[in-house]
Image (cartoon, helix red, strand yellow):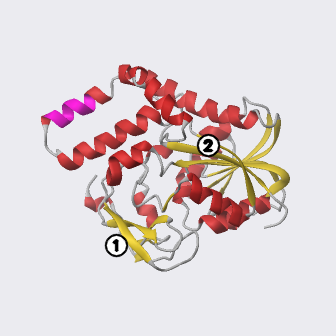
Amino acid sequence: MAKDLLLGPVELETVNCLLCGASQRQVLYRLRDWACELPGDFQLVVCETCGFVYQSPRPTQTTIGQYYPEDYQPFWRTIDAEPNRWRRWLRRRQWRTRCQQVSNLRPGGHLLDVGASTGVFLNEMRLYGDWTLAGVELNDKAAQYARQTFGLEIFVGQIEDAPWKPGTFDVITLWDVLEHLPQPVSALRKIRELLTADGYLIFSVPNGNSLDARLFGQYWIGLDAPRHMSVFTLESLRRLLQKTGYALEAAYCYYGRYTTFALSLQQWLRAHLPRSTFRSGMERWLALPLWRYLTWPYFWTLDQFRLGAILTIRARPVENI
């Protein structure tokens, strides 16, 4: 992508630790936008008080939208409109696995998806029980698509401003969304308010303690600057959940695997071999479905030790914060 795709100047803001509020920090990585190739210099810092990793300075909320172009992956077409048969199968498998995680807990009820994008997950949930569905989405075009294509109720805005009454939802999900939120503490507190007393919070985040994160460092796809504001580990998520009024019920890795590894390796190749025929050949080689099958035992083993690229959390609200 070219620099002129940005609509205007990007304002940056310096923020304190998103978990404990401390101001002392050290630079961990200096980053660029590898995924969308938009201009800008960014950095991840480590809180000197609690060790949490977050982005500072970062684009303000009035300008961060420029880093979510229309071809940003979560805004892609519906599953059935995907022309590549292999990708169509992978996407459907991923979403159905997520749907099963919800339906295994309840046969139906009121479900809210935060970061609903174009509504693919919510639409798939119609096959998994008697659900009343709603979503929260910041991108107006994605929300319009979800409304017009699937007839979904979508609120456009931050979760903190959501209009529903307390105790409305039995399940609230955030699939690869929490790391994008500017204030994860206030977001989870609002979600707790919207949940029923016996409700479930289910979300997934890039696993900052994964082997991929350690292997690729600043080129790990899970950092995705500047869109990812935070880098979570199981330990930091435990503290976040405790602070916002939840009890951790389950934590596991089950997907990401080869895809995130290959994307991270591609970013490393682009950084070190920017104009190389070898790099182009490697990228074609990495795209072969065969490697997904051959590496499956390796990535499955990582998942068993919670070292996989994506960490999924299930939590429930507690009475006393």
Tell me the CA gap for discs 2 and 1: 31 Å
Q: Could you say which disc has been placed on residue 119 in the image? A: 2
Residue at 33% from the left image edge and 23% from the top image edge: 288
The location of residue 81, given as percent across then percent down, is 50, 30
The location of residue 36, given as percent across then percent down, is 35, 51
Q: Quadrant of residue 287?
A: top left
Q: Quadrant of residue 263?
A: top left
Judged left or right of residue 105, residue 173 is: left
Label 1 amino acid? Pro
Task: Name the residue at the bottom extreme.
Answer: 23
Judged left or right of residue 226, residue 145 is: right
- Report the predominant secondary structure element of the magenta stretch: helix
The location of residue 131, given as percent across then percent down, is 79, 39
> Is 233 drawn above or below residue 293 in the view shown?
below
Query: Would you name the residue on which mark 1 appears?
Result: 9
Q: Quadrant of the C terminus?
A: bottom right
Judged left or right of residue 285, residue 145 is: right
Give the secondary structure at mark 1.
loop
Residue at 51% from the left image edge and 24% from the top image edge: 89
Q: Quadrant of residue 311?
A: top right
- Residue span colored magenta: 278-284
Label 2 amino acid? Gly
Residue at 17% from the left image edge and 44% from the top image edge: 273
